[in-house]
């Protein structure tokens, strides 16, 4: 009975189709063929240079990390393709308002409390990128909300753990690194497939009401650092100079001591050698010593020749003495 009904419906369908004029049947066949071809070709998709493809079949991921290029998947509603931009560095602006047109408008910034209970205004830019497309797409309903919350939590924690002086001066770069590290820890705990690239303070400073006090403190700190640097410079100049003079005096003393010791040693050795010779021949050695001494003394003496004119008598040698002034 069922076979008879199926045959009757088939005959009725074909009889109705054959009843249509030939040109109309040909047009309908062409339209159906085009529709089928269009449906089949709708499965062709392209992954851009900065993207990775994720193919989902009836809600289940069947392919992730599809490389850039031309690919094919079963057309909708069998499969669906997501193409997140994994190579793009995205940004979050904290304390900076965004206009509807996409531009930025400056605001006072986020008011935060530092570790030493001072209020400062912070404007920060957070950079991140997608590290795992599947987790980014399907772990949370809106990953941007999670990323925003993680960035604000990290910024609040780090600013609240440091003093205002260090944040405004020497520890600013370290604070940025700590914000990035803390943000990554929060993102990993939520498992959203996002990697923190960097955190940068666009503006950080005191509120306008107390800005003058901070400027005075900063000026005093600069004066202190300048005086300390000048004192350090003077110390670094004087100490090496004094050390050099002390070292030179010590070396001079050591050289003089060595010279005196060597000279005394030489004189003692010479005297001992002379004594040994004197013991061997006392008269000869004494004569030689006398002659050597005379050779040193006689060249310094002045010789005067007194001519008495062939006459005898005694000459007054006082006339040859140098004249001295009378008192």
Image (spheres, rainbow, N blue to C red):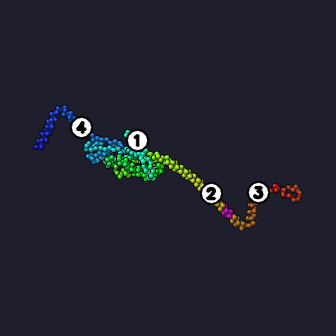
Secondary element type, mark 2: helix
Q: Which residue is mark 4?
A: 35
Horizontal side of residue 180 vs 278, given as left or right: left
In the depicted view, which residue is nearer to us: 158 or 187?
Answer: 158
Residue 181 rendering spot, x and y as whole percentages: 40, 51
Q: Which numbered circle lies on residue 104?
A: 1
In the depicted view, which residue is nearer to us: 230 or 168?
Answer: 168
> In front: mark 1 or mark 2?
1
Residue 285 rendering spot, x and y as whole percentages: 73, 64
Q: Quadrant of residue 33?
A: top left
Disc 1 and disc 4: Cα gap in Å? 47 Å
Q: Could you tell me which quadrant the C terminus lies in?
A: bottom right
Marks 1 and 4, the one that precedes in the sequence = 4
Disc 1 and disc 3: Cα gap in Å? 105 Å
Horizontal side of residue 264 vs 206, given as left or right: right
The stretch drawn in magenta includes residue 266: yes
> In front: mark 4 or mark 2?
4
Q: Which numbered circle lies on residue 123?
A: none
Disc 1 and disc 2: Cα gap in Å? 71 Å
Disc 4 and disc 3: Cα gap in Å? 139 Å
| Residue depicted at 37% across the width and 49% down the height | 150
**Badge 4 vs badge 2, beta-carbon distance below 8 Å:** no
Q: Which residue is mark 2?
A: 249
| Residue depicted at 26% across the width and 46% down the height | 58
> In front: mark 1 or mark 4?
1
Secondary element type, mark 3: helix
In the depicted view, which residue is nearer to us: 208 or 234?
Answer: 208
Residue 98 rendering spot, x and y as whole percentages: 39, 42
């Amino acid at each position: 009975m069922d076979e008879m009904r199926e045959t009757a419906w088939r005959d009725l369908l074909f009889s109705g189709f054959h009843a249509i004029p030939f040109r109309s049947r040909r047009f309908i066949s062409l339209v159906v063929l085009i529709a089928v071809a269009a449906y089949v070709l709708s499965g062709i998709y392209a992954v851009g240079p900065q993207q990775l493809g994720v193919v989902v079949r009836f809600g289940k991921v069947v392919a992730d990390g599809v490389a850039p290029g031309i690919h094919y998947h079963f057309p909708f509603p069998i499969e669906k393709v997501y193409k997140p931009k994994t190579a793009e560095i995205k940004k979050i602006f904290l304390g900076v308002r965004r206009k509807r047109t996409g531009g930025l408008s400056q605001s006072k910034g986020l008011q935060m409390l530092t570790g030493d209970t001072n209020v400062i205004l912070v404007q920060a830019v957070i950079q991140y990128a997608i590290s795992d497309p599947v987790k980014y797409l399907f772990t949370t309903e809106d990953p941007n909300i999670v990323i925003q919350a993680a960035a604000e939590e990290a910024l609040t924690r780090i600013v609240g753990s440091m003093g205002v002086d260090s944040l405004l001066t020497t520890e600013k770069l370290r604070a940025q690194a700590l914000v990035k590290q803390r943000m990554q820890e929060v993102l990993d705990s939520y498992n959203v497939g996002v990697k923190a690239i960097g955190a940068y303070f666009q503006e950080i400073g005191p509120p306008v009401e107390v800005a003058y006090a901070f400027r005075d403190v900063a000026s005093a700190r600069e004066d202190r650092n300048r005086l300390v640097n000048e004192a350090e410079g003077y110390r670094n100049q004087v100490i090496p100079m004094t050390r050099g003079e002390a070292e030179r005096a010590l070396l001079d003393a050591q050289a003089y001591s060595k010279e005196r010791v060597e000279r005394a040693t030489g004189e003692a050795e010479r005297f001992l050698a002379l004594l040994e010779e004197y013991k061997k021949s006392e008269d000869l050695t004494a004569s030689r010593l006398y002659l050597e001494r005379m050779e040193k003394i006689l060249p310094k003496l002045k010789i005067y020749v007194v001519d008495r004119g062939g006459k005898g008598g005694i000459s007054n040698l006082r006339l040859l003495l140098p004249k001295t002034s009378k008192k």
